[in-house]
Image (cartoon, helix red, strand yellow):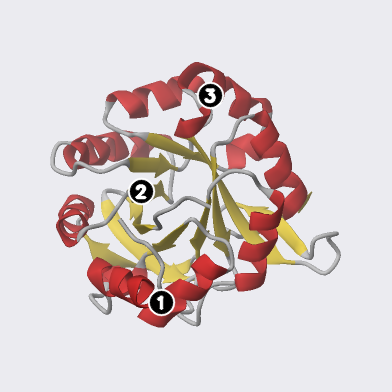
Amino acid sequence: MSLAVRVIPCLDVAAGRVVKGVNFLNLRDQGDPVELAERYFQQGADELTFLDVKATVDNRDTMYDVVRATAEKVFIPLTVGGGIRSVEDVAKLQAHGADKIGINSAAIARPALIGEIADRFGAQLVVLSLDITRDPGMPSGFVVTTHGGRTKTTIDAVAWAREAVERGAGELLVNSIDADGTKTGFDLELITLMRENAAVPVIASGGAGAAEHFPPAIRAGADAVLAASVFHSGQLSISDVKQSLSSEGIEVR
């Protein structure tokens, strides 16, 4: 685990606006992505993650504009994911200001893409985004999903994480579909399982609803914590989360 924990706001972007729902459904408008990114930067966020949740061809140019505008005003690492299918997509996003790239469905469809991106840009740029739900039929008890959690694959979550790291993924964004937007806390069992099976940093996502939810995620093995709705609503600030972590002896940046 890295020495200092990172706190990462996540902005789900659709048609140039930040949206948020529960279990990836019933998306509601949360505001302008550039304005929110600036707010989180000023509050002390360590990184930002943008996910293009409706990554259509029509939406792509809008997302490039959002990334560029954000990179001009926010000076912390920016991860962008959603609809990335080729090395060329990565190159264009990087040219617009993205520091890391999140890949999910395209890597499942063609795992070689992970290595292609890592070989050209370095493993540190590749964040494998895993949307995971419980499935007792899987060896690990967890299965990978696609299309924003709506489509189950037949891929065991732990096996896929291991393969992705072997292919060149430098970080795992582990999102619990079951916990997403529920504000009942992170899936600690899932975080622990990923930590035990991955030699790269693990970002915990899904379920944060209170400041006290964040320290257990770190103790379970996460190197970073990611949240969305608690920040967008103003329920918590970045400093609230860092104070909660620090109060339990966890080093923050």
Q: Identify the amino acid type marked 1.
A: Glu
Q: Which residue is mark 1?
A: 248
Crowding at dot 3, Cα within 10 Å, few <14 / some 14-19 / many 20+, comes out as many
Q: Quadrant of the C terminus?
A: bottom left
Q: Secondary structure at mark 2?
A: strand
Q: CA distance from mark 2 to mark 1?
A: 29 Å
Instruction: Look at discs 2 and 3 and give the one toward the viewer.
Output: 3
Q: Residue at x 54, y 69 (%)?
A: 219
- Name, please, the residue furthest toward the front: 249
Considering only order in the chain, which callout, 1 or 2, is on the residue closer to the N terminus?
2
Q: Which residue is mark 2?
A: 50
Q: Residue 43: horizontal and vertical position, in percent?
A: 18, 62
The vertical placement of 174 against 66, above or below, is below
Q: Residue at x 60, y 72 (%)?
A: 188
The vertical placement of 100 against 34, above or below, is above
Q: CA distance from mark 3 to mark 1?
A: 38 Å
Q: Are marks 2 and 1 in contact (CB under 8 Å)?
A: no
| Label disc, if present, on residue 23 of the rendered structure | none
Q: Residue 144: horizontal and vertical position, in percent?
A: 69, 54
Let me know if residue 148 appears in the view: no
Image quarter of residue 55:
top left
| Label disc, if present, on residue 117 of the rendered structure | 3
Q: Secondary structure at mark 3?
A: helix
- Name, please, the residue furthest toward the top: 120
